[in-house]
Amino acid sequence: MPSARDRVLDAYETLLVEQGPAGATLDAVAAAAEVSKGGLLYHFGSKEALAEGLLQRLRERSAADVEHMRADPGGAVAYYLQTSVPGAASPVGLTRTYLAALRIADGSATGEATRRALADVDAQGLAALRTEVPDPVLSWLVQLVGDGLYLRTLTGAPLTGDVGVDALVARLREMLISTSRG
Amino acid sequence: MPSARDRVLDAYETLLVEQGPAGATLDAVAAAAEVSKGGLLYHFGSKEALAEGLLQRLRERSAADVEHMRADPGGAVAYYLQTSVPGAASPVGLTRTYLAALRIADGSATGEATRRALADVDAQGLAALRTEVPDPVLSWLVQLVGDGLYLRTLTGAPLTGDVGVDALVARLREMLISTSRG
DNA sequence: GTAGCTGTACCGTCCGGACGGTACAGCCAT
DNA sequence: ATGGCTGTACCGTCCGGACGGTACAGCTAC
């Protein structure tokens, strides 16, 4: 059993992803984490502090994910795209945390901080991609494709058509090779 | 001055995009539309009916947008990507409505209907792209890039780096040509 | 005279947050 | 070794406020 604090963050993420901000009330989070409301507020003194805890986890996992990208034997591109596809979670759980944070990236004060944190994650990811794909246009393109896969996860829609991510990765790899040759 | 009904939907969209679902209260929507709360409830009998009105507008604008894609002299790909970039609204206002709908695509009952409507829009857009890009992998890739741009708009982040959408469209066009030749 | 609103007053519910209280583990001086 | 103190972890309850929604009495342009 993970610590209560981690269980609270897990439950917060789950509720944000599955029900949106409206469903992620303190009561609901506490119930899902099998913690009393008082216990939740012991760890996170307010809803804003809870969101800040999520952002902290996001930053930690982003740093860990970048390490995985650089170290992956299949390359950063394949790692990035494959961990962006719905259902396939990244080894450090970044995908889930990222999607949860997206749900609270609204116009509020915490939303502002959230958007900044998400922008940092994006920038770090792009930088990691550029070590494999130096061309700025191509690396950006790869990242946008991954982001598009994220968006599909956000809407909960299954992948369009019958084309898999593997085919996408393969095609992109061809492009990268032909570009580096040209 | 547009009709009160349209102004209400405009205000609803604006509040959803700029402040998220939490900011789009009936009171706030009525105030932003310069309509009394009673007047809002005259047109939309409940918050759910208001959301349904947004989805209806989404479907109408999606159909109109597909027409623009097919008719655009620059091609469907360029039209799709350029109307996906933050700031550049599509001529029929689909981008704004799409982003607003994304904000209410949560786990609720209306969220379910919203996700279905968004999936329909995506499917129609992909079908339109395929008239210009028959290759299923490539057309999907183009759509994912556009979706990635959408996501950037959602987080409110400026475009990463100093590479413009024009460069992206140009590069994609090269890929499409080289593929059709090969 | 009626469709299309405005404006106000109000209700029930739910949520965030504050608060007081409980259980218990560890530690340390005597 | 034990009594007392401290900090950690958590529980249960209550309150103020906001939100969705209802009801209704007007006004006014066509």
Image (tube, coloured by chain):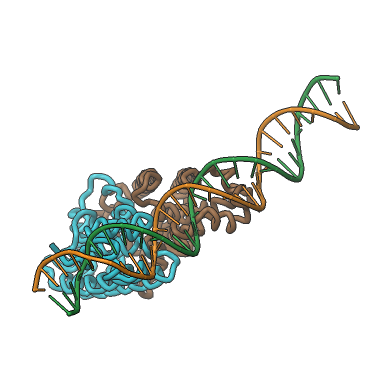
Chain colours: A brown, B cyan, C green, D orange
The foreground one among A97 and B24 is: B24
Residue C28 horizontal/vertical position (percent): 77, 24
**Is residue A5 shown left or right of residue A94?**
right
**Is residue C2 shown left or right of residue A14?**
left
Residue B91, above or below A59 = below
The foreground one among A78 and B50 is: B50
Residue B125 visible here: no
Q: In which quadrant of the rendered image does the C terminus of chain B lie?
A: bottom left
Residue B78 horizontal/vertical position (percent): 18, 63
Q: Residue at x 27, y 45 (%)?
A: B161
Q: Quadrant of residue B38?
A: bottom left
Residue A15 horizontal/vertical position (percent): 50, 59
Residue A160 visible here: yes
Q: Quadrant of residue A44?
A: top right
The foreground one among B45 and A4 is: B45
Residue B133, above or below A138 = below
Residue A94 horizontal/vertical position (percent): 47, 52
Q: Residue at x 24, y 54 (%)?
A: B86
